[in-house]
Amino acid sequence: MKIAILGGTGEQGFGLALRFAKNHEVIIGSRKKERAEDAAEKVKSILKERGIDANVRGLENKDAAKEGDIVILSLPYEYTLSTIKDLKEHLDGKIVVSIGVPLATAIGDKPTRPLPPPQGSVAEMVQEKLKNSKVVSAFQNVCCRALEDLDNPVDCDILVCGDDEEAKKVVMELAEEIEGVRAIDCGELEMSRIIEQITPLLIKLNIKYKLKGTGIRITGF
Ligand SMILES: NC(=O)c1ccc[n+]([C@@H]2O[C@H](COP(=O)([O-])OP(=O)(O)OC[C@H]3O[C@@H](n4cnc5c(N)ncnc54)[C@H](OP(=O)(O)O)[C@@H]3O)[C@@H](O)[C@H]2O)c1
């Protein structure tokens, strides 16, 4: 599978690239091609040290969106719509993974406060804009530090939701390729309202208890 990560130069996208490049072709997207290429080289060199010859490239976001079979939006919430607005034709029919968390940092307020968009969640905001894409919501509750730490399994459930069952299944299988991860089908895309709002709580716990990166586990099934 060809996985494009728009904004993959940032911490979360980079962590996902490291994990997915073991089994897939990964394209890191950026506003600047050189930045994407630098990040791609870094992923390749980290994986090479572990004996993995990864297929990773860097492209501008537009070209990454064009090439990806699955496109992950790893962008600050407040710049998501402005980034995808000209990419609709390249994203039509594709699985688009929304990982954004709507934090009040977008307006200069605290990272422990949610600030959902009028659509209810980032994922629903993306689906409203990309009517012909299959938007799946996932990866909001896993910390970039856990993803980057290839020496350890990721101790986190990935809560996944979406309105297209097939697309959701593909993303769940992808998530479970990450060692330690269990993916949980949480239902329709609107459940993303709740999933996204768990993250400010995790950030609060990181700050309060001076932790590096808390995650979430659902018990009982
Ligand atoms: N960090 C985490 O632990 C974590 C955990 C869970 C969920 N998330 C979510 O994952 C997403 C990415 O997080 P992150 O921490 O990696 O974010 P980030 O580093 O702040 O941003 C990711 C990338 O977005 C691009 N970007 C920045 N400003 C932009 C603008 N004005 N317009 C278009 N692109 C812009 C930058 O890439 P270029 O400069 O190369 O274009 C940047 O490297 C966010 O939605 C966040 O809520 C993060």
Image: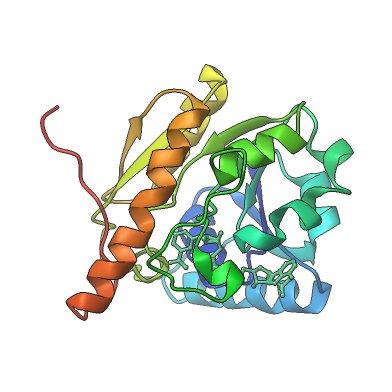
Q: Residue at x 50, y 53 (%)?
A: 20
Coloration mode:
rainbow
Camera-side residue of 192 and 107:
107
- Tell me where residue 51 appears, x and y as whole percent: 44, 68
- Tell me where residue 13 appears, x and y as whole percent: 56, 62
- Tell me where residue 148 appears, x and y as whole percent: 41, 70
Camera-side residue of 108 and 181:
108
Q: In this rendering, is residue 155 above or below 50?
A: above
- Tell me where residue 100 appears, x and y as whole percent: 54, 53
Q: Residue at x 30, y 59 (%)?
A: 201
Direction from residue 137 to residue 127 in the image, left or right: right
- On the rendered image, what quadrant is the C terminus found in? top left
Direction from residue 112 to residue 65 in the image, left or right: right
The residue at the far left in this view is: 220
- On the rendered image, what quadrant is the N terminus found in? top right
Task: Tell me which corner region of the image, top left, top right, bottom left or bottom right, holds residue 106.
Answer: bottom right
Q: In this rendering, is residue 132 above or below 125?
A: above
Q: In this rendering, is residue 54 above or below 71?
A: below
Q: Residue at x 39, y 63 (%)?
A: 147
The residue at the far top in this view is: 165
Count of marks, rendered view: 0
Q: Quadrant of ligand 1?
A: bottom right
Task: Tell me which corner region of the image, top left, top right, bottom left or bottom right, holds residue 159.
Answer: top left
Task: Tell me which corner region of the image, top left, top right, bottom left or bottom right, holds residue 74.
Answer: bottom right
Q: Is residue 142 visible?
A: no
Q: Residue at x 50, y 55 (%)?
A: 101
Direction from residue 210 to residue 15 in the image, left or right: right
Q: Is residue 98 visible?
A: yes
